[in-house]
Amino acid sequence: MSVDPDCPPTLSCSEAAESGDPSPKPEVPGPAETYDSPQMTEADVSLCEAASPFPSSGDLHVQETPDSSTSPCVPLPDSLEALPKKGEVKVRMKKQKVRTVFTQTQLCVLKDRFQRQKYLSLQQMQELSSFLNLNYKQVKTWFQNQRMKYKRWQKSNWQNSADAPQKGPAPVEYPGTCSNYAQGNLVNTSGNLPMWSNHTWNNSAWNTQSWANHSWNTQTWNSQTCNMQTWNAQTWNAQTWYPQGWNSPYPSCGEEPLQPCLPFPQSLPANDLEASLEVAGDSQKYLNSPQALDLFLNYAMSLQPEDL
DNA sequence: ACACCGTTATTT
DNA sequence: AAATAACGGTGT
């Protein structure tokens, strides 16, 4: 909650948060941080965050999370401000962790996506992250954490549906989606299937229900057994996702040559989700990628009030 | 390179 | 104090 969009990205949010303005809601309706935050420079980030030892972050362009306020990078201990070569001063630098506070919108999208898809392919994550204006890494992490959370939840609910062998009205629903979130629209009310509920999911046993039943607390499906990596690669590639389908359902999408699954560039105008949605409201000139369109169609109506 | 999972640290 | 974003170690 709160997500203080007010907090100037540049200054320590925590500081601001603590010292005053506990006002949780009255946020500027600011489309979840419409401000394009100067945020910190990469230098800053790497400096304070000690730069994730992530090898891959190289090719997976890690855009430094644009919206979604990220925690400060300021109060580094002391004596270090001079800090000319970060290479050397390894000593007592406590390395403050930067924690991003996702916006409600971002969370909604993430959660909803998670509900129908526990694992995303690399590409999907990239797309999603791009759309949400988050890092690939952030999305990846989020999904990982979410899986763990889900797992925990399953365990605790395990007893509940434990013995409803496999017929039960499906275990209690995982508290995934946002309250007034119109997840109804998500699943094609019109046969326009969102990409992630496409055939791949439909006919398989992987709808949310059966997934839940799957209770994989035993190692049933997890990566070790199945090797998600390979599976992902083979199953979730562009061809799979964009079979031929993008010509049909959507009005102004027919024209799109719809390339496979592009690197999902900044096809979205500068900004973030809400901006895109806003724009997309009347003209779809920016939605030149299936992903954007899809997301729009799926989420446009379901934004949290506070985000708009 | 990625998933899992325990841990750490921040945010509320 | 709880929730959770991010990290680090480990296994494949």
Image: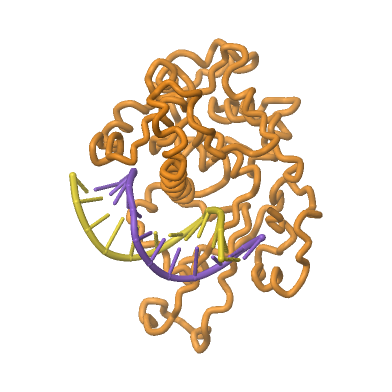
Chain colours: A orange, B purple, C yellow
Residue A61 appears in the rendering? no
Residue A191 visible in the snapshot: yes
Residue positioned 70% across, 68% down in the render: A17
Task: Pick out the residue farthest to the bottom.
Answer: A79
Q: How many marks?
A: 0
- Looking at the picture, tell me which residue is in the foreground, A14 or A88: A14
| Horizontal and vertical percent position of residue A152 | 43, 47
**Residue at x 37% of width, y 19% of height:** A204
**Image side of residue A161 versus residue A75, left or right:** left
Q: Position of residue A230 (x, y in %)?
A: 26, 34
Describe residue A40's horizontal placement relative to residue B8 as left or right.
right
Image position of A32 (left or right of A235): right
Residue at (23% x, 37% y) in the render:
A225
Q: Quadrant of the C terminus of chain A?
A: top right
Give x and y (percent) for residue A2: 71, 55
Residue A142 vertical placement versus A260 (above, below) = below
Quick check: A102 above or below A43? Answer: above
Of A187 and A35, which appears nearest the observer? A187
The front one of C7 and A169 is A169
- Quadrant in the picture for residue A125: top left
Q: Position of residue A221 (x, y in %)?
A: 30, 34
Above or below, A155 against A292 in this view is below
Residue A52, quarter of the rendered image:
bottom left
